[in-house]
Amino acid sequence: MTATLTKPVAGPRTLEDLLLEKRKFAPSKKFKDSAHANSEVIYKEGANFVKFWKKRAHELTWSKKWKKTLEWKAPFAQWFVGGKLNVSVNCVDRHLTTWRKNKAAIIWEGEPGETRTFTYQQLSREVNRFANGLKSLGAVRGDRVVLYMPMVPELAIAMLACARIGAAHSVVFGGFSAEALRDRINDCQAKILVTADGGYRKGHVIPLKQWADEALQEAPGVKKVIVYKRLSQSNPAAWTEGRDIDWNDLVREQSDFCKAENMDSEDLLYILYTSGTTGKPKGIMHTTGGYLTGAYATTKYVFDIKDEDIHWCTADIGWVTGHSYVVYGPLANGATTLMYEGSPDWPAKDRFWAIIAKYKVTILYTAPTAIRTFMKWGDDLPAKHDMSSLRLLGSVGEPINPEAWMWYRKTIGKERCPIVDTWWQTETGAIMISPLPGVTATKPGSATRPLPGIQAEVVDENGKTVKVGAGYLIIKNPWPAMLRGIYGDQERYKAQYWSRFPGYYFTGDGAKRDKDGYLWLLGRVDDVLKVSGHRLSTMEIESALVDNSKVAEAAVIGKHDDIKENAVFAFVTLKEDVSAAGGNRQAVIDELKAHVVKKIGSIARPDEILFTAELPKTRSGKIMRRLLRDVAEGRALGDTTTLADPNVVKSLKEKYEHLES
Ligand code: PRX
């Protein structure tokens, strides 16, 4: 946590360059005239944050109004205390009494090209039937249910069904390995797992059921597995009689009415695991009333969502972005959300643009990694498609460099669509820093200002406000969608987020504030990596490496990458007997990469592995990752005076330069 702000932002520009950025784009009159928020008044309103959020929460449907808007016993917040509501009622039932009942709630496209659409009425039927199905298997309010699914509508249906019966869901991204799934199931003590026989990605089958079966060998708490059959009959999954139930068999006889549980505002809605600075992922807890208020209000104001919109957030539901902006935010607003199962380059590199043209997408929300990749693929691909339906573009997950921002604006948005660069985290539940598209003038590469009702600031080492300049990003006041802690480990919650700057929530990010008060996010200042927008911990990958019997020690860093932001670079010391035996180095590299994939998933596969007899350490034995980054990124070595043996890192640098040349 005491790292210094040395990392440059993604892309070729440096921090200094960023502050020289002069370009500024005000909202067009046309956009402003029809926007939900179109004047500074909303920022002024946000100054009284409790009142601001109270007003937004009133737009949801509550079965019982709350007594107190905020109960803050730092660092534990309770929002809308005593209020009762159900998330599935807010995302589905309340639209059924309006004209929206026959409106498309979810439009889905599978990677092989199938389309399915669910109106709110149809969604209601599926959610209710699946909720009854869960109950028939013994699920009750207060349980945890793990969802390990491809991007199919049934994933959203399962989430809403859990919410309906008061069971917390924990979605595990389908790219995580069997072992990662096992650890998450065991940590949250789930009794039911919902999965699929598989999904499609880049034309390949992702064998989710096979991985789930492996995970379940060491997850004895799971008694029932519901399997949604996504694949064709030619790909039958192994079946455990008595434990496995076909989704369709489960729902076939169920009634399409399931009474929604009357949940307390502070009841757990979901747990989502994310990587922190230790080897063990954290189960981030989000509760009912506050989270929904955050997801609902930010979708309304940041995406300026309207009934006519087709909202496409390209994130997988396995990440928080998918929770808030594929499922809960759009549906709570009665909007139409688009879900796409597969990869942007399958069967061709213009798949996204084809989808936009086909469904007349109006709002596109994606990650800088994707934007930089599209940029590399060239302007001809988007030019082949009519994307005139687009009216708003969003970016999330990593800092966006000004070049990519400008390309997005010109080539995709045709200089007509405002761009919202949205900063937030799994922990924050909803967007925290972003332009309001009808109010805030944007600057390429800046997430601009904290949203109304959010007090984000940049502080120095001592927690003192930095008016202009670089420092650490903190949040001063509680907000409704904030995490309520780490499942089963509230001490870690306090230590992780509230100890570095007492009284403030520490984000783990560096940021710079310019003279207009605009914020420029600089990336993580701790041991968390962003690899193609996916959040990984260096420690987690190190633990996976040392778990291999050949490895004595490992240190992992994020090497700057123009497309992915971070590439995973591992420095590995092999055990002496392995080293002495010599042998085929490439074979060992391949084995270690495969080992990390087995332990975590392919998203964590190291891009580079460099063997070294020793790692650079301080006299007290701490690995100097900063110097390892210097080696990997080809920079002159920084201060080496605290090292036990400065020669270790010098020879490592020479070795890597020799390999590179
Ligand atoms: O470093 C920040 C980066 O992503 C981290 C949070 O990752 P995760 O919990 O996976 O959530 C990602 C999607 C909400 C942050 O600590 N980050 C997220 N959005 C931005 C960003 N960095 C810069 N600019 C952003 N817009």
Image: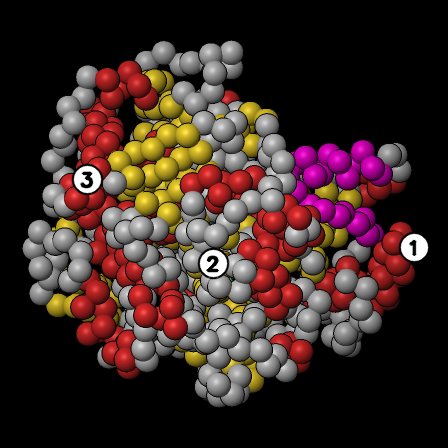
Packing grade of label 3 (10 A; few <14, some 14-19, many >=20) is many
Q: In this view, does 295 lie above or below 224?
A: below
Q: Nearer the viewer, residue 561 or 267?
A: 561
Which residue bears the numbered disc 2? 393
Q: Cα distance, mark 1 to mark 3?
A: 64 Å
Which label's residue is closer to the chain start, 2 or 1?
A: 2
Q: Cα distance, mark 2 to mark 1?
A: 41 Å
The secondary structure type at the circle numbered 2 is strand
Q: Is residue 442 left or right of residue 52?
A: right
Magenta-colored stretch includes residue 469: no
The label shown at residue 101 is 3
Q: Which amino acid does label 3 sit on?
A: Lys
Give the position of the C terminus as an image quadrant.
bottom right
Estimate the x, y position of residue 249 in percent, counting from the top left: 28, 16
Q: What residue type is labelled 2?
A: Leu
Which label's residue is closer to the chain start, 3 or 2?
A: 3
Magenta-colored stretch includes residue 612: yes
User: Comparing marks 1 and 3, which lies closer to the viewer?
Assistant: 3
Q: Cα distance, mark 3 to mark 2?
A: 27 Å
Q: Give the range drawn in magenta.
A: 585-613
Q: In this view, does 258 lie to the left or right of 493?
A: left
Which residue bears the numbered disc 1? 661
Estimate the x, y position of residue 67 in percent, counting from the top left: 9, 65
Question: Magenta span: helix, strand or loop, mainly?
Answer: helix
- Residue sitting at x 9%, y 59%: 65
